[in-house]
Amino acid sequence: MFTHSRKLRYLIAGGAGFVGTNLARRLLETGAMVDCVDNLSTGRKANVADLARYPNFNFIKLDIADTASCNRLLRRRYSHIYNLACPTGVPNIALLGEEMLMVSSVGTLNLLKVARRSKASYLFASTAEVYGDPEVFPQPESYVGKVDPVGPRSPYEEGKRFGEALTRFWGRKHNVDVRIVRIFNTYGPAMSPDDQRVIPQMLSRLIAGKPVPIYGDGAQTRTFLHVDDLVDGLMTVMENGANAEVYNIGGDTQISICELFDLAKMATGLAGRAEFANHFIADHRGRCPDTTKVRELGWRPCVSLVDGIRQSHRDLVASIQARAMAASGRPAKRLAEPHHASKSRAAEGFPALT
Ligand SMILES: NC(=O)c1ccc[n+]([C@@H]2O[C@H](COP(=O)([O-])OP(=O)(O)OC[C@H]3O[C@@H](n4cnc5c(N)ncnc54)[C@H](O)[C@@H]3O)[C@@H](O)[C@H]2O)c1
């Protein structure tokens, strides 16, 4: 479907992150040239090292919110720009809230200028968080959301809302071909074992034989999408989406956090127990995308949650082993076999997630 007969040059901001790495790999495999820019705030050097084996890959360490640095990109020519750069993870809101606001505002503007100079198509990665604590299920793109502009999640939520407004306004004013994608919870390979989003945290704790924190009563629901399906969706919107339009991309089967915990144990064969705790930040009861618009472009998710969790488990085990080897200079203990938490010593030395 996405094969390129001529060399296209892509810029991926946030390319050392989870989604950026998976997108970059997919584009590189079509023969495209890919520049990734990233300041490595939540991205991983290991992801960059993995991509560096492709001859058409180029990594530039750069903060897109730093206008002087970003101006260097004005000298390069791109056909497409994916702006995925933003620190992620709920605990990071307290730590990197200002960076979230700056990258979504100044960083977005800087990359829009690069897109204008290059006459590139531009995609802004927004989030389901723009709907806040929704009162409408599922959420269509026309739903304006319920967000507290000064609430504890506001640096991420309002940053992304501003980024959307700027992308649409600036695109129209300066005739830049822009799209906005609201991404719902996505998981899969290339997530860090330290990532504190639901699935990697759950799997990392199970692998380490540690209790899995479940915030609240675990009845809150989410949908989960495998990153391969998200990459398909991003490329579909980039290629076939309409100028200045907004598209939800996400899984559309709702599952509670407790049900997800049971599924993760079943899919991986790992044993473990949940540790219920009060949420450290106001949580949203649920979120579910209305994906009618992106489906009209031909997109369909293909990876089942069970298969995706199994694949994520294998990838996290490999990452943990690689990290242990790098730290000790010796081959790591084998972690791949399912084991009971009480018997597990395999992940000793693996830093605890908070
Ligand atoms: N994965 C999801 O479930 C999900 C859900 C909703 C939205 N999103 C959005 O998709 C995008 C990618 O998310 P991800 O899951 O890959 O997260 P990630 O944290 O793995 O990747 C984000 C990348 O952006 C980089 N970055 C942050 N600030 C930067 C800056 N100022 N300049 C350059 N690089 C910077 C980080 O170092 C990181 O590599 C983000 O914008 C995120 O808000 C993701």
Image (cartoon, rainbow, N blue to C red):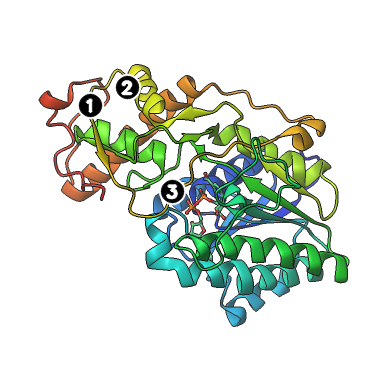
Q: Which residue is mark 3?
A: 283
Left or right for 6, reference 74: right
Element under disc 3 = loop
Q: Type of residue at label 1? A: Gly
Which residue occupies 22% across, 43% down?
324
Which residue occupies 79% across, 29% down?
298
Residue 225 place in picture, x, y as percent: 56, 33
Q: Type of residue at label 2? A: Lys
Viewer-closest of 133 and 259: 133
Which residue occupies 75% across, 39% down?
236
Quadrant of residue 209 within the rendered picture = top left
Left or right for 354, reference 225: left
Q: Which mark is residue 265?
A: 2
Element under disc 2 = helix
Which residue occupies 29% across, 47% down?
278
Q: Which mark is residue 339?
A: none
